[in-house]
Amino acid sequence: MLGDPGFPARVRATGLTSVTLAATYHSTRAATPHHPARRLVDAAHSALYRPSPDPAAPRWAGARLRPAAPSWTGGDPDPFATAANLLRAEGLAITAWLVLGHDTRLGTAHPDLTVVNCYGEHYRYALCPSHGEVRAYAAALAAEALDGVPVDGVSLEGCGQLGVVHAGTHEKTEGAWTADEARWLSVCCCAACANSWSAHGLRPGSVREALRTAVRTGRPPSGDLAATLLAVRHEATDALRAGVIAAVRAQAQSAPVTLHAHPDPWATGPSPGLTPRAAADVDALLVPVWPVGRASEEVIAVATDSGTPVQAYVTTLPPMRPDEVPAHVRRLRAAGASGLGLYHLGLAPAARLEVLGKIVREWQLEQAEGTKA
């Protein structure tokens, strides 16, 4: 929104009162259809949108993993703080958006800390939370992102393990694997995970072979093996999240924390699968339900079983058809969604902004009627 004085007015025109603003984010090439001076942001690598961290500071001293500063923000040394302060001055609430384990720059520089599949192939965009270095980096990144900037909430993306599915540069893997094949190709086989398997009585070589067999034949590993692999992933995810939340609470004690998550415990990616402990650790869950259909409604219904408020994460961008979105949102609300995350105000062309406004007004009206009842 920097350099775009019309942005706050567009937010208010939709009826929204809160904006989720990236403080750390992965590489992207993003459209800016409403900006007065440009039409693209080409973020070549993951970045921290705060001042460059001091490598001698206690939270970074001796660390191999450190975030990079962006070079595409017009020279502002603290773009997140600048944007957050501008928006808060306009009366808008700010949620800090933190992307944690998704970092191609660091994964390329330190492949030993990345997710590795059963064929020995590294996912260089995915830092594996089984490594203590990765967990320490995520906590330090969260602390650095929030240091000294008042926020009204914090949203955690990639707070767990990423897997084989990734929207990357000239990605040519869509549809290549079944859901089961993608699941087994997303089991991390890095040295840290292998050490955890050994602690559970498994032989790493046998595990990798069982996973390769599952990928080739479509027959899953034994139930006991699968349960142990999931337990190892969840142990690392819980440890990562605990460190990050402690860092968040130290910087923004009263800000509610929202976790990007999915009720499928095997899910990987920006919204990792919920562990048995995850929902109780945060104030809300943001659950992706972009496809229109019964499956999305079932996902929301399952997520609400956690007892933690569930926000439905909905896109209004293509290929979603504008006329489908309002009814989709109504069904998600009926399925149990208590909040709404709309993607993405900055990317949506004018016609989609009208859809956003309609959704927001309808949601607010239903909330008001529910309160009266």
Image: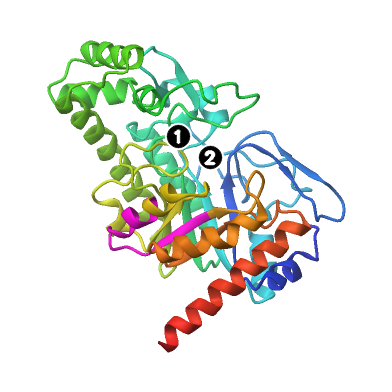
Q: Secondary structure at mark 1?
A: loop
Look at label 1 and name its amino acid: Ala
Q: Which residue is mark 2?
A: 55
User: Mark 2 to mark 1: distance in Å?
Assistant: 8 Å
Q: Is residue 171 visible?
A: yes
Does the magenta-highlighted stretch encompass residue 292? Answer: no
Residue 106 pos. (x, y %) = 53, 29
Does the magenta-highlighted stretch encompass residue 304? Answer: yes
Residue 113 pos. (x, y %) = 41, 26
Q: Residue furthest bottom?
A: 372
Is 213 placed left or right of 101 in the picture? left
Q: Which residue: 67% across, 62% down?
A: 355
Q: Which residue is mark 1?
A: 63
Decide which of 76, 236 is in the foreground and name it: 236
In which quadrant is the N terminus drawn? Answer: bottom right
Look at label 2 and name its amino acid: Pro
Decide which of 76, 25 is in the foreground and name it: 25
Residue 33 pos. (x, y %) = 79, 51
Q: Residues within 10 Å of mark 2 (few under 14, many from 20)?
A: few
In which quadrant is the C terminus drawn? Answer: bottom left
In the image, residue 274 sits, relative to residue 326, either above or below, namely: above
Q: Which residue: 55% across, 26% down?
A: 174
Is 233 placed left or right of 327 in the picture? left
Please tell me which of labels 2 and 1 falls first in the chain: 2
Residue segment shown in magenta: 299-313
Residue 73 pos. (x, y %) = 74, 47
Decide which of 83, 231 is in the foreground and name it: 231
Q: Is residue 250 visible?
A: no
